[in-house]
Image: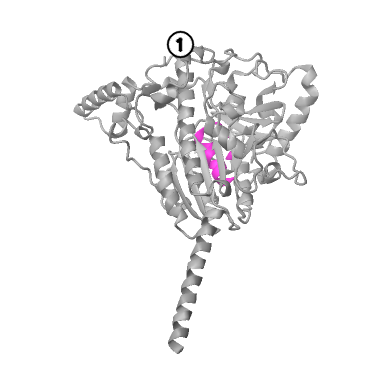
Amino acid sequence: MKLNKIIFGFLCLAVFTCKSQQVATVSKTSGTNQKKNILFIAVDDLKPLLSNYGHPEMITPNFDRLAKMGVTFTNAQVQYAVCGPSRASVMTGTYPDRTKVWDLHTNFRESAPDLVSMPEYMISQGYETTGIGKIFHKGSSSPGHDAKSWSIPWIQPDNFDPKYGAPMFEYYQNPDTKKKMQALIDEAEAKGIKGGKLRNYVFKRLKPSTECADVSDEAYQDGIYTKEALRKLDILMNGDKPWFLAVGFQKPHLPFIAPKKYWDLYDRSKVKLAEFQQLAEGTPRIAYQNYGELRAFSDIDDNYDIGDIIDLDKQRELVHGYMAAVSYIDAQLGKLLDALEAKGILDNTIIVLWGDHGWHLGDHTEWCKHSNFEQAAHFPFMWAGPGVAKDIKVDNPVELLDLFPTLFDLAGVAPSSQTEGKSLVPLIDGNAATTMTADAAFHQYARGKRMGYSIRTDRYRYTEWHDNDYRSYKPYKDENIIGRELYDYQDDPLETKNWVDDPKYKAVVTQLKAKLKAHLTDPKNH
């Protein structure tokens, strides 16, 4: 009898253990934990040239799919239209004048060592964090792509499709290009040129701005990033902590490279070029840049300057390449969403997707980013998952650094006092009872010692260019202002004219100047 009781006890324990394991498994995959799992997707140089942003010429079904799952912000503005400062701001939830990152070389760990990164903070809140690809700017001097941010180390995968081998200089798979580049490498090495100087030697002689090669997705970096992300997803799901998985895609950054099947989605003869290819009337020259990033490619004339128009056939090739690269990223997004769906966690994972800034494609004769114009400052911003309404658009002006507190709010994580942004949950939860005021966004861009600060509302953008190394933590002085801009997106959506001195906009300028000055002089913003 005693033996029977012991056996019965073991059976009960076994059943209880089995049930506990089942509950734990459901807990990790159902999203019932108070702290939610997070898929964090960054896309380099992605402007809102997407079908869900009103561009039916784009073939981006997975961006459409994500849009139907959640919320799309239609007037989202970056803090600074170049990778380093933009990513430092979103990853710390603070403005560039607090991170003190205004270029591609500064590491916020050195310029603002008191700041804590988003995934670093989440580790302190019980999260497992890991990343693949470009999340922080690659120029950061921190080892391990800011190693403090990851509880599972960030690793740059290089297991390219063996059929094609590794691309030349991380970019090129076209056999002819690779052959020519290898010859240049041999030539350089024979002259004793090594390291970074060797790369520069080759690129000064051969560096195509586009490539259409008939290869697999995994022949290029972003296809490899997707495979690595899926591998890490399995590791995270087998753990016992909520997780934060960051995936940073490189395209559509230059050079515009994608497998041929994505180029074939578009007819180049029907590719639309920028409608307004002139300098805006009355706009100060300091507002413009001469797109040196593009001119660094060997098939672009390095003599182009502000106001010059690139050959129209080359423009069509570049725009076609950008579109192909966006569709390539769309396919990678689809693979991630498919994996979440197959694992039964698609509807219970917080997903946030963002571009680090927009991109000029010939408007104002401009290319690349590096400006305060709409095409550089406007970025795609999308949310889905628990706590997010489905298939809606929000038109309020919002900022990229708002991502920081919004993510913590949705995930059930204690808020961080560090952030200078605002939680957007009242705008995305679909609850009419929760409202908030979001009527302006702020951003900036420097030209040497001169900083252009902008405010963007639902209709206008007002910009002041301040001289003498002014930053918002210094005294605001009108005598420092050397140029101003005002654009009206209702009556002049292409920014064809600077309206700042037009009498009919006097009241608007006065109001926007006061708002911008209040923002710049508010101590909590720096």
Instruction: Name the residue carrying label 1.
Output: 313
Q: Amino acid at mark 1?
A: Asp
Of residues 324 and 314, the one nearer the viewer is 324
Judge left or right: residue 444 versus residue 153.
right
Please, which colouring scheme is shown?
one colour
Describe the element under mark 1 as helix, strand or loop. Answer: helix
- Give the residue at the far left of this rendering: 190
x and y, in percent, of residue 130 in the image: 45, 50
Q: How many marks?
A: 1
Judge left or right: residue 423 versus residue 355.
right
- Is residue 82 shown in magenta? yes
Magenta: main secondary structure equals helix
- Which quadrant of the figure has residue 163? top left
Q: Residue at x 55, y 39 (%)?
A: 353
| Magenta part of the chain | 79-96
x and y, in percent, of residue 476 in the image: 69, 35
Q: Residue at x 65, y 19 (%)?
A: 495
Instruction: Establish if 34 lies above or below 466.
Output: below
- Which quadrant of the figure has residue 34? bottom right
For the residue carrying disc 1, how many other residues have a C-alpha within 10 Å: few (<14), some (14-19), or many (20+)? Answer: few
- Give the residue at the far bottom of this rendering: 1
x and y, in percent, of residue 514 in the image: 75, 33
Q: Residue at x 78, y 30 (%)?
A: 511
x and y, in percent, of residue 148 in the image: 46, 52
Q: Is residue 105 visible?
A: no
Instruction: Establish if 23 lies above or below 224.
Output: below
Q: Is residue 227 visible?
A: yes
Q: Residue at x 36, y 31 (%)?
A: 216
